[in-house]
Amino acid sequence: MKNTKLFSGTIALTLIIALLTGQAPVSAAEKQENKTASVNFVAFDDAEYHTSPDKRIGAKILVDPSKVGPSIATLVHLTYLPGAHIGSHRHVFVTEIIHVLEGNLTLRIGDEIKILGPNSTAFIPAKSFHEYLNDSTDVVKFLQYYSPSGPEEEYRNWTKPAADEAAAVKAAPEKKEEAKHVVAQPLPTVPGSPTEVKLGGVVEKPAEPKKVEDKDRLSLSSQPPSVASAAKTIKAVEKSGNK
């Protein structure tokens, strides 16, 4: 009973301190998440990807001395596209091991030339001249182990596609939003077309009355005899009526 009261009092005291300090109690799961990621386990996607100048070889340093600290060994994952080739070279103080995962890799060690298929392994002693070639039409993937580490540093000088893409996106100018829902662009003006024409604003000018010239006027003398005599009779009747 006393132990139960003591435990309850401890929990209550912890909650009161947390409320006063403004911090919530941290669970064990949250403590685990807050820990720094372990360098003892490496996910393939987390390793930086490097490509050779001719873009035919891709390299991922899985066990990276720059992350795990000074090491007597390192492991690199390599991808060789068809035609990829690393010329003859040697490592004076470094032993190398090759293990093929996919495809067929042509490997020369000294005077020996072998084609390594999947699940094949080769041992390259220090000071031995060697070279790699993918003369097939398939992609070759293999692991490269160095002991001690050192030769893998050459891969760091290669291109990082992810970094180049990010730089290109950052350097690209922002595109202005263009007008949408445009039915058609305005047509160019046809030479000779009237300017400043407003629809619905056409005004017709009234026709001026045609002037009648004197020669076109009718007169009594110009009328036929029957018409002229009838006109005189009408005038005579009008005069007598006025009297």
Image (tube, helix red, strand yellow):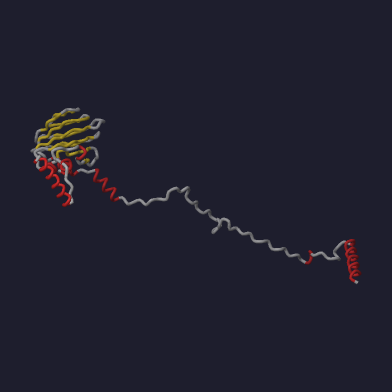
Nearest the viewer among 2 and 210 is: 2
Relative horizontal placement of residue 68, taking residue 221 as reference (left or right): left
Nearest the viewer among 180 and 33 is: 33
Relative horizontal placement of residue 223, taking residue 15 as reference (left or right): right
Image spot of residue 64 (x, y percent):
14, 40
Residue at the image position 20 percent from the left and 41 percent from the top: 48
Residue at the image position 29 percent from the left and 48 percent from the top: 169
User: Quarter holding the C terminus?
Assistant: bottom right
Where is residue 136, by image quadrant? top left
Single out the residue that lies furthest toward the front: 1
Report how many numbered discs are placed on residues in the image.
Answer: 0
Residue at the image position 13 percent from the left and 31 percent from the top: 109
Nearest the viewer among 67 and 151 is: 67
105 is higher (above) or lower (below) than 155? above
Nearest the viewer among 119 and 15 is: 15
Where is residue 89, by image quadrant? top left
Single out the residue that lies furthest toward the bottom: 243
Image spot of residue 108 (x, y percent):
15, 31
Residue at the image position 73 percent from the left and 65 percent from the top: 211
Relative horizontal placement of residue 107, taking residue 172 as reference (left or right): left
User: Quarter holding the N terminus?
Assistant: top left
Image spot of residue 85 (x, y percent):
20, 36
